[in-house]
């Protein structure tokens, strides 16, 4: 019989690993972007999420 609990936790661990890899890649990309010279005509826009309350 298959051990679904073990399979679920293995999957959850792999998903967590993938999320860590994606988060690190995003942070590195943002860091590189912020450390480079500004590009003429490029604007950074802040988008407010109206679904969340600001505290």
Image: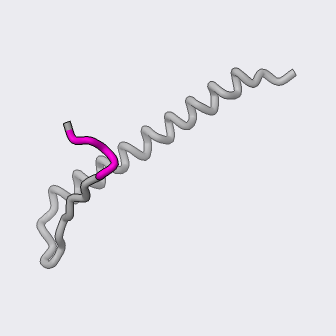
Q: Is residue 17 left or right of residue 10?
A: left
Q: In x, y percent, where is residue 11?
A: 63, 33
Front residue of this view, candidates 14 and 44: 44
Q: In x, y percent, where is residue 22?
A: 43, 46
Residue in the picture at 17% in, 56% down? 34
Figure check: 37 above or below 55: below
Quadrant of image for the C terminus: top left
Q: In x, y percent, where is residue 3?
A: 77, 21
Quadrant of image for the N terminus: top right
Q: Is residue 16 left or right of residue 1?
A: left
Q: Is residue 43 left or right of residue 14?
A: left
- Residue at the outermost right position: 1
Where are the magenta residues, as a range?
50-54
Residue 15, located in which quarter of the rendered image? Answer: top right
Q: Is residue 41 on the magenta stretch?
A: no
Magenta stretch, overall SS: loop
Residue 54, located in which quarter of the rendered image? Answer: top left
Figure check: 47 above or below 54: below
Q: How is the image coloured?
A: one colour
Residue 38, located in which quarter of the rendered image? Answer: bottom left
Q: In x, y percent, where is residue 49?
A: 29, 52
Figure check: 7 above or below 36: above
Front residue of this view, candidates 8 and 33: 8
Residue in the picture at 17% in, 70% down? 43
């Amino acid at each position: 019989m298959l051990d679904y609990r073990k399979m679920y936790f293995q999957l959850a661990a792999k998903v967590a690993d993938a999320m860590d890899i994606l988060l690190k890649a995003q942070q590195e990309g943002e860091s590189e972007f912020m450390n480079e010279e500004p590009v003429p005509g490029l604007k950074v826009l802040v988008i407010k999420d109206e679904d969340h309350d600001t505290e």
